[in-house]
Amino acid sequence: MKKTAHIISHSHWDREWYLPFEKHRYYFIKLMNNLVDQFKKEGNDFKSFHLDGQTVLLEDYFAVHPENREIVKQLVKEKKLYIGPWYILQDAFLTSSEANIRNLQIGLNDTKAYGHAAKIGYFPDTFGIYGQAPQILKQAGIDTAAFGRGVKPTGFNNTVSDTPNFESPYSEMLWQSPDGSSVLGILFANWYSNGNEIPVDEEEAKVFWDQKLQDAEKYASTNQLLFMNGCDHQPLQKTIPEAIETAAALYPEFQFKHSSFNEYTEALKQALPKELQVIEGELRNQRTDGWSTLVNTASSRIYLKQWNNYCQTLLEKVTEPLAAMNYLTGTIYPREYIRFMWKSLMKNHPHDSICGCSVDEVHREMVTRFETVAQMADVFVTEQAIELTEKIDTSETPEGGIPLVVINTTGWEKNDVITKVVDLERVYFSQMHFEKIPGYLKEKETLNYKLIDDQGRTVLFQQDEPVIEFGYDLPEDKFRQPFFAKRAKLSFFAEGIPSFGYKTFYLVPAESPVQLIEPEEMEAETGSIEMENEYVHIQFHEDGSFDLMHKETGESFHRLGIYEDTGDIGNEYMYKEAKGHAPITTKGVAAEFTILEKSTLRTVLEFTQTLSIPASADDRLAIERNQLIWHKEREAGRSSEMTAINLRTVVTLAKGMKGPAFKLTIDNQATDHRLRVLFPTGLKTETHKADSIFEIVTRPNVPENEWENPSFCHHQQRFSSLADERMGLTVATDGLQEYEILPVDGTIAVTVLRATSELGDWGYFPTPEAQCLGIQTAEWQVLPHEKDVLESQAFVDAYQYKVSLVVVQPSIHKGEWPTTNQFVKSKANGLAWSSMKMAEDRDHLMVRWFNPTEQKKSLNASIKDYQSYKSTILEVRTDQREDQYEAEKYEIITLGFYK
C-alpha cells in the first residue's frame, strides 16, 4: 500500500511577538488577501488552508477588509478555509481554567456564523499543555489533539532534537487525562514547518523530499505522513499544486495530497496500530535536558501575570456569577457584553503575549488592554450589584440606619473582614449651593453608631474618622447628580455570607458607639514581634523571617520568608543562573519593623530591608547576546558594581484568616537578576502538589535522569503545596506563577521578580523594559494545615485568596427578595468550585466544579423552582436527575439549571 504524504498549508500567526500587533497585522492582511485571490483563480488546484486554529484572526482581518466577509464565509463553508476551534491560541498554563474554557466556547461560537469548525485540539507552539486537556477536548466533542511541544525537545529557532528516552517513540500517541479521558495525540515531531517551502524544481525537490520523507517515516506509526506547509508568519506558498506534481513524479511509490486536518486524521485513524504509547497528564518536556521547556516565561514580566490574574478573577469569580444571580431575580443576562469583556481579555492570552516573551511595544499595549478590561469589569460589577440590591427589601432598616448588603459570588461560604467606605450623609448640589455643603457637613455632629445583622445581632466593627468628599450619581432617567458626602471607612467581620448569595447588615444610630473596635497603641515593638489570630501564631526574627505555628495541631514551620537573589543571564523564555556567584539572601539582614494597624479585627505589620546586590550582569553577557550564544552555553557572571534594592513587606493577619498575607514592594534598581521568597518546610517528601488547569496536580520534587538544567521550575495557577502524613504548607499567590521545590530542606521557592533584557529565540531582540526597573509588587498568603492540601481542604482557602466580597450601600426601599438569600444551594464537599454563568446560547444557568481527588464525590445542587441536568463544558446536556450527582475521579462537572 502506498504511503500518503498529507501536505497541510498553514501559517502559525502570532498576533504579536518580535513585532507589535499592528505590524504583524499588516503582513497578515497581505497573507489573507493573497489567500482570497488564490481561491478565486479559475481551475485552481489549491485545495485548502488551515487558519491556525484561532478565530480572532478573522476579526483582525475584517476590521480592515469588511467587504471580504462573505467571500471568507463561503470559503469556510466549502471547507477550503479551516477555522477554530479556539478564539486565540492561548498559553495553556498561564491562563486560568475558565479562560481556557471561554476560549473554546467563544471560538466555537464564532465558527457558527461561518458554518464549519476545524474540530482538532490545536496547540502548535503552546509552551507545554495541562494534563486535563484530553478531558476538556472530549467534553467538547474533539477526539484529536496536535501539538509541537511537551514531548520532544525544541530549541533555538524551532529546531528539534532527539533524546534517548522521550515519552513516545511515535508522532502518534494516546494522550490521557487523570480522569481516564483520552484523545489521539499528534506530535509535530519534525515541527510544524516540516513541509515548508516545498520546491517545484525537480533537483531541489529531490534533495528536499529525500530528507523530509525520511524524517517523517522515522516517527510515523502508520503509512499516513504529515507535512506542515508553513511556519511562523509564513507567506502563502501559491505553488503547492505544482510542487505536489513534481513530488508525485519523483516518488511514484508515495501519494502526495494537498490535505487538511480533517482528511489527514480520518485516514490516520483507519491506519493506526492496535496499540499506541499512552502519555498521561501534563506535557511539560520532562524527559529532556530541561533547557528548552520555556517554563521561565512564568516569571517574565510578572506584572502581566498579576494584571491577568486580577482581570480573570474579576470576570469569572465576580462578574459572571453576579450577573447570573441578577438573572435569577428577573434581570436580562448581558451575554454579549460579558463575551466582549472576555474577548478583550483573551487578546492578551496568546503565548507570546501573556508569557511576557515579546518586544517591549507588545507588552505596553497589553497593559492598556488589561486596564480597559478592568474598567469594563469594575463598572459592570458596580452596576450589577446596585441592580441586585434594588430588589432586596431594605424597608425594615431601623430609623436613621444605613443598610449594607454583602454579596458572595463564590461557591463557598465566606467569613471575611471587609472594609467599606460608607456615606453617613449626602447633600446634593440640587439641595444646597455646592460651596456651602462641605462646611455644613463638617459642622454637623456625627452620630454614634452600632452595627447589627438582619437578625438584630450586634457585630464588632471599626470606624475611621469621617471625611468630606465629592461624589456623583449617574441616574438612568436624569442628568448626573453631584454631591458632597460625609464618609467613614468601616471595617467589620462579615460572618456566614452564604455561597452564591448575600446578607444584609445595618449601621444604626446609638447613644454611644456599641461594640466599636478601637485601634490599639501602635508603638514600634522593642522585643518579640508577634501576630496571632484564632488559627495561627507568627513570630518574626530580626531579619524578617518568621516562625508560623498552626494552633490546632501546635506544629510550627521555622524561618519562613527569606528573600533570595541570584544573577540571571538567560532571556524572557529561560532563566540561567550567572556563573560563579552564590545566592544573596536577606538571612541576617536586619529589618526595621513598624506596626501599621492593630485591633481585634486585624493586625498589619510592616518591615523594611535593604539588600545589596550586583548592579547587573558583567560585560560578557552583552557580547554573548550579540553573538546569539544560546542561554545554555553562556558563561557570563555578575558585575562587581553593587547597588541597593529596598524591600518593603507588609504583613496582614485578620480575624478568620487561616494564615498571614504578604505584600512585597520592591524598588528594583538592578538588572539581570531573579528574586524569590523561600519557605523551608523541613518536610521530607518525593512529590508535591500545585494548582493547574482543573487539577491539583502531583509533581516530582526532583527531575528525571535526562534533566541537566540546574533549575527545575514549574508553572502554577493559584498555589503550590508540600505535605507529609502529618502537616502541610501551602503558598497561595496573586499572579506569581513560577515556583521551584528545593528538596534538601523541602523549600517552596516562589519567584517574585525576574529581570532580563532580551527576547531570546531566533535573533537578538533587546527588551530593556523586561528588566522591570522601579517599583514592583508581589503578594501571597501562607497557609499551614494538617495533612495535605486536599485532605485538609486548604485548597478552598487558597482558591478564595484575592476573591473579595462585594459590598453595596443600597437605598431604603421595598423589595421582593429577603435580606439574606442563597440563590444556589449546594453540597459539594471535597469539590473545587470553578464558575457560575448563563449558557452561551440560552437562558440556562450553568455551574461548574471539578473533583481534585481520585475518590468519587457526591454533589447536590438546587435552585428553587428550577430543574437541573449534567452538561459538558460546551453546555450540551448529557444527563438529567433530581439535584443529586456524582463527580467521578478528577472529573470536570458542569450542571445546568432551567425552568
Image (tube, grey):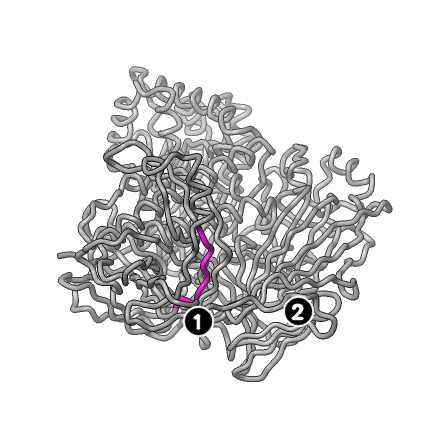
- Three-letter code for the amino acid on which mark 1 is drawn: Gln
Identify which residue, 743 or 806, lies in the foreground: 806
What's the residue at 36%, 37% (across, down)? 432
Residue 394, image quadrant: bottom left
Q: Residue furthest right?
A: 640
Q: Which residue is mark 1?
A: 515
Identify which residue, 461 or 284, lies in the foreground: 461
Residue 453, image quadrant: bottom left
> How far apart, in angstroms, are the residues tagged by discs 2 and 1?
36 Å
| Location of residue 46 with respect to 850 vertically, above or below | above
Residue 178, image quadrant: bottom left
What's the residue at 65%, 60% (across, down)? 606
Q: In what element is the residue under mark 2?
A: strand
Compared across the picture, whether 886 is left or right of 418 comes to: left
Q: Which mark is residue 846?
A: none
Q: Is residue 267 visible?
A: no
**Magenta segment: does it hold 150?**
no
Q: Residue furthest top?
A: 42
- Three-letter code for the amino acid on which mark 2 is drawn: Leu
Quadrant (top left, top right, bottom left, bottom right) of the N terminus = top left
Q: Which residue is mark 2?
A: 560
| Location of residue 759 with respect to 532 vertically, above or below | above
Front tag of 2 and 1 = 1
Provide residue 299's location: percent of width, then percent of height. Answer: 60, 50
Quadrant (top left, top right, bottom left, bottom right) of the C terminus = bottom left
Q: In what element is the residue under mark 1?
A: loop
Q: Which region is colored magenta?
A: 487-494
Compared across the picture, whether 573 is left or right of 654 comes to: right
